[in-house]
Image (cartoon, rainbow, N blue to C red):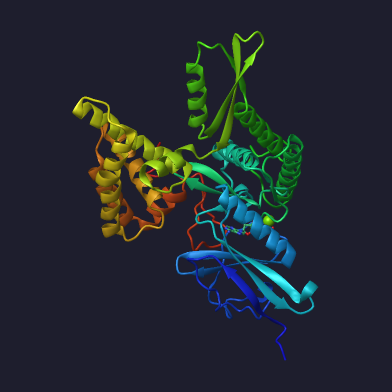
């Protein structure tokens, strides 16, 4: 007789375990540590479906059980988000599990990569002392929505549990999880964006009201004002990137100014439209922004390195500094690509090899290098002169050796409440801790 449960099919992307040792003969809600030693607990948001987390070495995966058609849809949308390089969790595979009694006698299990060092907004908002991050947190959420909308993603369920955030070289970066209700389009209409904003407002206000009934919310997180404030930030950013300027033909520098201003915000400009207006003495300029990964793309083109947007912006600053130094040395302009090559060869790679010898392999090389840069600024600020990379590496290694937990916690995710890959229940760490020695200011 066929057992009532078991794997029917497993579609997996390369580079991950095969997951065959998991107890597929049981529904996810019956998986227990006694049966499956891979189960781990991580801070998580509220969910409709059963979601469990399993670890394979340092890698954690999220598994979510849902009806087959819904699972396939979410899988497809997450794949699409990945192709469009939008900030969301990365899908790893989809299992079809025989489940007698379920519609079609089958359920799906969606497998995604656990987003390391991330927390859902809901968990974060349960911590007091959040006041000083409020602006940045709300900005990150608004900017996530802008990026997703620019990429043609209609979410349909933006909420405190479905937005994850993590630190990216000192900035907060928000990511989408849960694309069950989502759709990908070539372009969103204003109506679709408006609907998504309404859903966001309703979810966030509802989520905050729910939290307020359980814990005392930080005074700055008003149940009724927070969601409208996210919308305002969204609208400001949307208007900024879609702004039309009127210029006269002699003012072509303003085109570059505008592109630079958008690049500063991290947006790449795909096209610039210039249309003559009125009697032809003026031009209307419209820039078409493609994504918020300007620095990421630039770093990748120059060095082949893959980093997050903020990390890339920091690393590029170092490349530019080196370019200036080289230019002074040879007394003629040095192309950025030459500086990037030298930087990779003389700074980035040797520093990381040194760090690997001292501290072991790093999970996120770009982040580690950025932490060393932060430490360099900290030391330089104290010394009132540039202490140089070598001193910073030594200092950083010493700090990590002395207080490994502190260095990790404080630099990778602090001063926000930190989560390690193998995170325990929601962190009790208070974000009011004194500034970390490696943090800037
Ligand atoms: N890949 C992932 N990385 C980090 N957290 C995740 C991941 N997948 C799910 N979670 C956590 O689990 C929670 C529930 O997952 P979700 O996909 O939103 O399920 P549901 O569709 O039931 O709401 C999320 O709020 C999030 O905290
Ligand atoms: Mg969810």
Q: Quadrant of ligand 2?
A: bottom right
Q: Residue furthest left?
A: 330
**Which quadrant: the N terminus?**
bottom right
Vertically, is 136 above or below 106? above
**In the rendered image, which quarter is residue 225 located in?**
top right
Vertically, is 15 above or below 202? below
**Which quadrant: the C terminus?**
top left
Q: Nearer the viewer, residue 141 or 218?
A: 141
List x then y, in percent, for residue 124: 59, 49
List x then y, in percent, for residue 259: 50, 26
Q: Residue furthest bottom?
A: 1
List x then y, in percent, for residue 104: 78, 74
**In the rendered image, which quarter is residue 390 located in?**
top left
| 53 with respect to 315 (left or right) | right
Q: Residue at x 57, y 51 (%)?
A: 83
Q: Nearer the viewer, residue 35 or 405?
A: 35
Picture mark count = 0
Q: Residue at x 62, y 21 (%)?
A: 244
Q: Say if residue 73 shows up in the picture.
A: yes
Q: Say if residue 435 shows up in the picture.
A: no
Q: Residue at x 47, y 17 (%)?
A: 253
List x then y, in percent, for residue 408: 40, 54
């Amino acid at each position: 007789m066929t057992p009532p449960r078991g794997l029917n099919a497993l579609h997996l992307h390369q580079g991950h375990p095969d997951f065959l040792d998991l107890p597929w003969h049981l529904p996810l809600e019956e998986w227990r540590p006694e049966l499956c030693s891979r189960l781990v607990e991580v801070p998580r948001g509220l969910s409709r479906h059963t979601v469990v987390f399993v670890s394979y070495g340092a890698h954690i995966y999220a598994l979510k059980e849902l009806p087959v058609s819904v699972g396939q849809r979410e899988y497809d949308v997450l794949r699409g988000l990945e192709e469009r390089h939008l900030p969301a969790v990365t899908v790893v595979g989809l299992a079809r599990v025989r489940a007698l009694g379920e519609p079609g006698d089958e359920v799906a299990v969606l497998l995604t990569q656990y987003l390391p060092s991330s927390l859902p907004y809901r968990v974060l908002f349960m911590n007091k002392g959040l006041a000083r991050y409020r602006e940045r947190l709300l900005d990150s959420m608004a900017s996530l929505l802008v990026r997703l909308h620019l990429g043609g993603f209609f979410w349909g369920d933006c909420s405190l549990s479905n937005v994850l955030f993590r630190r990216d070289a000192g900035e907060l970066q928000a990511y989408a999880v849960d694309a069950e209700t989502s759709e990908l389009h070539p372009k969103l209409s204003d109506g679709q964006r408006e609907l998504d904003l309404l859903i966001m407002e309703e979810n966030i206000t509802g989520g905050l009201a729910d939290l307020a009934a359980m814990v005392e919310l930080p005074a700055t997180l008003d149940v009724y004002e927070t969601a409208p404030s996210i919308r305002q930030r969204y609208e400001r950013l949307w208007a900024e990137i879609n702004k039309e300027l009127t210029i006269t033909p002699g003012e072509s520098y303003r085109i570059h100014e505008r592109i630079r201003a958008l690049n500063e915000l991290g947006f790449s400009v795909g096209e610039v439209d210039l249309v003559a207006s009125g009697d032809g003495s003026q031009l209307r300029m419209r820039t078409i922004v493609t994504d918020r990964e300007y620095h990421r793309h630039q770093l990748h083109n120059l060095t082949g390195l893959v980093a997050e947007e903020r990390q890339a912006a920091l690393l590029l600053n170092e490349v530019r500094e080196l370019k200036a130094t080289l230019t002074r040395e040879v007394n003629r302009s040095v192309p950025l690509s030459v500086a990037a090559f030298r930087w990779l060869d003389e700074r980035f790679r040797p520093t990381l090899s040194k760090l690997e010898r001292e501290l072991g392999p790093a999970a996120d090389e770009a982040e580690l290098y950025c932490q060393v840069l932060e430490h360099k600024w900290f030391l330089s600020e104290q010394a009132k002169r540039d202490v140089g990379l070598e001193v910073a590496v030594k200092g950083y290694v010493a700090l990590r050796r002395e207080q490994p937990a502190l260095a990790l916690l404080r630099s990778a995710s602090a001063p926000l409440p930190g989560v390690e890959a193998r995170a325990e229940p929601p962190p009790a760490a208070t974000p009011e801790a004194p500034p970390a020695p490696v943090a800037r200011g």
